[in-house]
Amino acid sequence: MRTAKPFLLDLIIMYCKRKRPVLYLCGTATTSYKTSVYAVSWFIWKRYHKIESGSEARMATIGDVAKLAGISVSTVSRYLNKSGYVNAETEMKIKHAIEKLNYSPSVVARGLAGKNTKTLALLLPDISNPFFPELARAVEDVASIYGYTVILCNTDGQVGKEKKYIDALKSKNIDGIIFASHTLGQEDVDKLASYNIPYVCLDRAPTNGNCSVVRSNDLEGSKLAVKHLLEAGCKKIAHIYGPQDLITSKERLIGYEEAVRAFDWFSPSLMVPGDFGIESGKRATEILMNRHPDIDAIFAGNDLMAFGALKVLHRMGINVPEQVAVCGYDGISITEITEPELTTIAQPIYDMGALVSRILIKKIEGDLEEDQIHVLDVKLTARESTRRRG
């Protein structure tokens, strides 16, 4: 391993090459360039050496607290972890030493000692989807009330990335994990069990594993969207559905099919796949309008795909809602700022995040009696994009 001094000199030389004017501020304008570099380097090296040798302030340790209080490290540890008796006089000595040294116990060290680190992880499939930041806000709000902090992990929907996160979080002694991603497999469940890490899921549970799940009623939400469009006077409703490896997308598609199957105008070609992104909503809308120029409503499986539909319809010169009504799903906040404002089936995003956070903390602290599936109701938020006709 390289020594600190040459390493510092290398860094300083690189810095001076880029910031040569700084040498003039050091009073070295009359010396050679190389001498200037070493003059500045020696000054910084001496300062570094002083810090290394302990002549300057450093972070206090539990040993420093014990030494100042005149007691053993194990006694200070018992006091900090509340794991044994410490008499009142000794407590006062420890408190005084902690205040004088400005000592702060290491959360990581507490984790290594078998104590909670008061840290949760939230694994998200796509942080760029506005649904998930709104969810994360609720998770963090509730966690904070209970004294926990939250680490956000973006998996990009990749199984390998999720597995790496699980291993990394184990090494950081995480207290529990919320999976809002959809890539949790049996291997991960077995690993979490072996690590003894509590976890909860949003939308779906793994096939085998003790896990509480928080989700919304997607089947009924989809039927509610179709019902609203029919009541608005729509005669031929198409659907852009999400990835079918997700239970949320499956149930929204099933709900749509059940609601329209009896109509003479229904055809499987009215259903086009998307990937929950805006671009896929655009592509799907172009396909639908080419296949069925007479459709007068599009129900998208999420709000982002609905945004894509609005964009394409506007580009085609098709008026929304006069010619084609558009309805989304999720109820993210930015549906209020589209033109026209987007009708959506609103999930209780904040409530879902708050509930899943509360359940995990109860599980960590041993207050959860049994794992359950919690299904929350959705509601219609009707706006300009589906305004009633005639």
Image: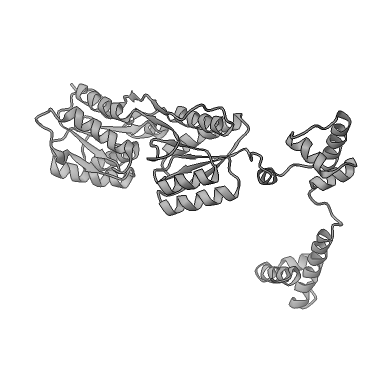
Instruction: Look at 74% across and 42% down and name the residue there.
Output: 105
Q: Classify residue 192 as left or right of residue 283.
A: right
In this picture, is 382 found above or below 63?
Answer: above
109 or 16, which is in the foreground? 109
Single out the residue that lies furthest toward the left.
Answer: 264
The C terminus, quarter of image: top left
Q: Classify residue 78 as left or right of residue 338.
A: right
In this picture, is 16 found above or below 383?
Answer: below
120 or 351, which is in the foreground? 120
Q: Classify residue 108 as left or right of residue 125.
A: right
**Residue 100, position as x, y percentages in the image:** 86, 40
**Residue 75, position as x, y percentages in the image:** 82, 39
Q: Is residue 14 among what the camera can see? A: yes
The N terminus, quarter of image: bottom right
**Residue 39, position as x, y percentages in the image:** 80, 71
Q: Quadrant of residue 266?
A: top left
94 or 379, which is in the foreground? 94
**Residue 32, position as x, y percentages in the image:** 77, 78
Q: Quadrant of residue 362?
A: top right
Instruction: Look at 31% across and 45% down and name the residue there.
Output: 275
Q: How is the image coloured?
A: one colour
Instruction: Look at 33% across and 44% down and name the residue there.
Output: 278
250 or 316, which is in the foreground? 250
